[in-house]
């Protein structure tokens, strides 16, 4: 029996509701595998700021430091509510980015997956979707503009200005690019490196390093694609992509676009991998408009559990089973009202019921 400690950071908005479904699945996984999970909830996000005075309070840091993996829900408030919190302490700047930095979670995996049978979720035409959408965005998560030096002030013309620095060194680029090549080796042996080297020097360095690391992976076919063009191709022909790698801000933007071509960010789980510790989270926000209504789809949260089972605990078969279970609930015609409209041939169920159905389907699969 292996014991794992998991820190649970439910966060804000729909975080609690979708986390409850993740916990349901973890308990089931525990009951049918040789593992035991110690689940340790910790305050995080705007909720934590109001209750503890910090978005990532010291107690939560201790729980996370002590955990084998961290499962995070969603953070953020409505624009109005956010304004009650000082700028640097808002949950993104005061909680999430410090967590990424603390655990150096440089490798962000965002799978973009929609089988052809679920093509109706996507705004793309069936002929564009073809056999389905199936690629992965690998985003550098602890560098670039997000973490560069920042300065604001008034310049000598009396004008307010803001300056932020975009810097990458070769080590930072090499480690993420290497992960991307390794991932490509396990998939279709193609890699799209996304850049803007017609303008940015950081992209010139990025592209050079992709070339250098690529020498070690002669089997991989590498394509260099400008980020603006990549966003068009993602809509016109997503089937050409398998593994994409890019710097932090490009990855932020393109991964939301990827959620768009699937039909919802609710279909975007993610893994944030560091040298020692990793955390797992939906790629989307806390959807304050639908919080507490029991209608948010827990797919991205449960998908993040699947990624944790595989990447942190090596429970590969169970991870596969979990993906399959979620797909089978959709395939059986169930969905939630945040993803689907009534009258489109689907049966609308609640967050909880969706989680129950995933659990039921998982229980029926062999380990
Ligand atoms: C994401 C989110 C975050 C980011 C925000 C919440 C800071 O949009 O994980 O993509 O920009 O990285
Ligand atoms: Mn984002």
Image (cartoon, helix red, strand yellow):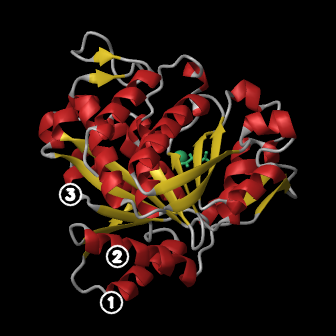
Horizontal and vertical percent position of residue 353: 41, 22
Q: Is residue 234 above or below residue 295?
A: below
Between label 2 and label 3, give the one nearer the viewer: 2
Tell me if I can see residue 11 in this picture: yes
Q: Position of residue 130 (x, y in %)?
A: 13, 44
Above-or-below relation of 354 to 311:
above
- Toward the front, the furthest residue is 1
Residue under the point 32% across and 40% down: 362
Numbered marks: total: 3
Residue bearing the label numbered 3:
240
Mark 3 to mark 1: distance in Å? 23 Å
Of pointers 2 and 3, the one earlier in the residue sequence: 2
Label pair 1/2, CB-CB below 8 angstroms:
yes
Residue at which label 1 appears:
216
Distance between mark 2 and mark 3 Cα atoms: 17 Å
Which residue sits at x=78%, y=38%? Answer: 48
Q: Quadrant of residue 34?
A: bottom left
Q: Secondary structure at mark 1?
A: loop
Q: Nearer the viewer, residue 64 or 362?
A: 362
- Check if mark 3's residue and mark 1's residue have beta carbons within 8 Å: no
Label whose residue precedes the other's in the sequence (1 or 2): 2
Residue 298 falls left or right of residue 131: right
Q: Secondary structure under badge 2?
A: helix
181 with respect to 133 (left or right): right
Q: Is residue 269 visible?
A: no
Residue at position x 21%, y 42% in the image: 115
Determine the CA span between mark 1 and mark 2: 9 Å
| Residue matched to label 2 | 181
């Amino acid at each position: 029996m292996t014991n794992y400690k998991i820190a649970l950071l439910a966060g804000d908005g729909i975080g609690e509701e979708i986390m409850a479904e993740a916990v349901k699945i973890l308990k089931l996984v525990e009951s049918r595998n040789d593992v035991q999970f110690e689940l340790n909830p910790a305050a995080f996000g705007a909720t934590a700021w109001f209750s503890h005075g910090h978005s990532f309070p010291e107690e939560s840091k201790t729980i996370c430091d002590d955990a084998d993996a961290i499962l995070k829900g969603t953070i953020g408030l409505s624009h109005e509510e956010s304004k009650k919190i000082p700028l640097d302490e808002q949950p993104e700047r005061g909680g999430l980015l410090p967590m990424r930095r603390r655990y150096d979670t440089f490798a962000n995996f965002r799978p973009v997956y929609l089988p052809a049978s679920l093509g109706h979720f996507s705004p793309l035409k069936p002929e564009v979707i073809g056999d389905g959408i199936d690629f992965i965005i690998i985003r550098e998560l602890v560098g670039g503009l997000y973490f560069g030096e920042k300065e604001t002030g008034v310049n000598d013309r009396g004008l307010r200005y803001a300056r932020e620095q975009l810097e990458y060194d070769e080590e930072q680029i090499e480690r993420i690019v290497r992960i991307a090549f390794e991932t490509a080796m396990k998939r279709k042996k193609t890699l799209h490196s996304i850049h803007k080297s017609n303008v940015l020097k950081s992209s010139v360095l990025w592209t050079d390093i992709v070339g250098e690391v690529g020498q070690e992976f002669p089997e991989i076919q590498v394509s260099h694609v400008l980020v603006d063009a990549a966003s068009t191709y993602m809509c016109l022909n997503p089937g050409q992509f398998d593994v994409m790698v890019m710097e932090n801000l490009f990855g932020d933007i393109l991964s939301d676009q990827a959620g768009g071509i699937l039909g919802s960010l609710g279909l975007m789980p993610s893994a944030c991998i560091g040298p020692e510790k990793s955390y797992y989270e939906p790629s989307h926000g806390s959807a304050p408009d639908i919080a507490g209504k029991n209608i948010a789809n827990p797919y991205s949260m449960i998908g993040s559990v699947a990624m944790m089972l595989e990447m942190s605990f090596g429970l590969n078969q169970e991870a596969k089973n979990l993906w399959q279970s979620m797909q089978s609930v959709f395939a059986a015609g169930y969905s939630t009202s945040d993803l689907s409209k009534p009258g489109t041939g689907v049966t609308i169920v609640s967050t909880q019921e969706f989680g129950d159905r995933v659990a039921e389907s998982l229980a029926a699969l062999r380990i």
